[in-house]
Amino acid sequence: MKLILAVIQDKDSNRLLQALVENNFRATKLSSTGGFLKSGNTTFMIGTEEIRVERALQIIKENCKHRDQLVAPISPMGGNADSYVPYPVEVEVGGATVFVLPVEQFHQF
């Protein structure tokens, strides 16, 4: 048994959840916050048999897209103001960060 932790952008969460359900995967959906952009993410916890991990990863990859987003940089606190860029910067966000972990035991009560 494996536990898949997938951290995705909120915009992709409904599409991913629907695809997982259509493919008979059970998932727990958690709200989370990213450290880089300090914006909302969704973390999925998916428990599955080892032989179904590749299919789950394929579904995640197909439903979590990269996109460009304008981000207002945070002003430096006590840092060098010469390197501070006061206008929005375009960064690539989205996709998925996925961890696949072994599960020693699984209980459902």
Image (cartoon, helix red, strand yellow):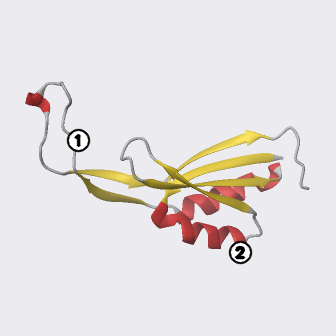
Query: Which one is nearer the viewer's eye here, 19 or 84?
Result: 84
Q: Is residue 19 above or below residue 51?
A: below
Q: How many marks?
A: 2
**Residue depicted at 71% across the width and 75% down the height:** 22
Q: Is residue 90 above or below residue 22?
A: above
- Which amino acid lies under the numbered mark 2 shown in the image of this protein? Glu
Residue 19 position within the rendered picture, expressed as x and y whole percent measured from the top left:
64, 71
Which residue lies most toward the left here? 82
**Residue depicted at 38% across the width and 53% down the height:** 93
In the picture provided, is 15 more to the left or to the right than 81?
Answer: right
- Which amino acid lies under the numbered mark 1 shown in the image of this protein? Ile
- Residue neighbourhood size for the residue with mark 2, other residues' Cα within 10 Å, grouped as few (<14), some (14–19), many (≥20): few
Query: Which one is nearer the viewer's eye here, 94 or 43?
Result: 43
Q: Nearer the viewer, mark 1 or mark 2?
A: 1
In the picture provided, is 57 more to the left or to the right than 15?
Answer: right
Q: Which residue is mark 1?
A: 74
Image mark for residue 106: none
Residue 29 position within the rendered picture, expressed as x and y whole percent measured from the top left:
63, 60
**Residue depicted at 79% across the width and 54% down the height:** 48
- Residue neighbourhood size for the residue with mark 1, other residues' Cα within 10 Å, grouped as few (<14), some (14–19), many (≥20): few
Residue 106 position within the rendered picture, expressed as x and y whole percent measured from the top left:
87, 47
Residue 73's quadrant in the figure? Answer: top left
- Mark 1 touches mark 2? (CB < 8 Å): no
Residue 50 position within the rendered picture, expressed as x and y whole percent measured from the top left:
81, 49
Image mark for residue 22: 2
Query: Which one is nearer the viewer's eye here, 60 or 31?
Result: 31
Mark 1 element type:
loop
Mark 2 element type:
helix
**CA–CA distance between discs 1 and 2?**
41 Å
**First of labels 1, 2 by sequence position:** 2
**Residue depicted at 59% across the width and 67% down the height:** 16
Residue 14's quadrant in the figure? Answer: bottom right
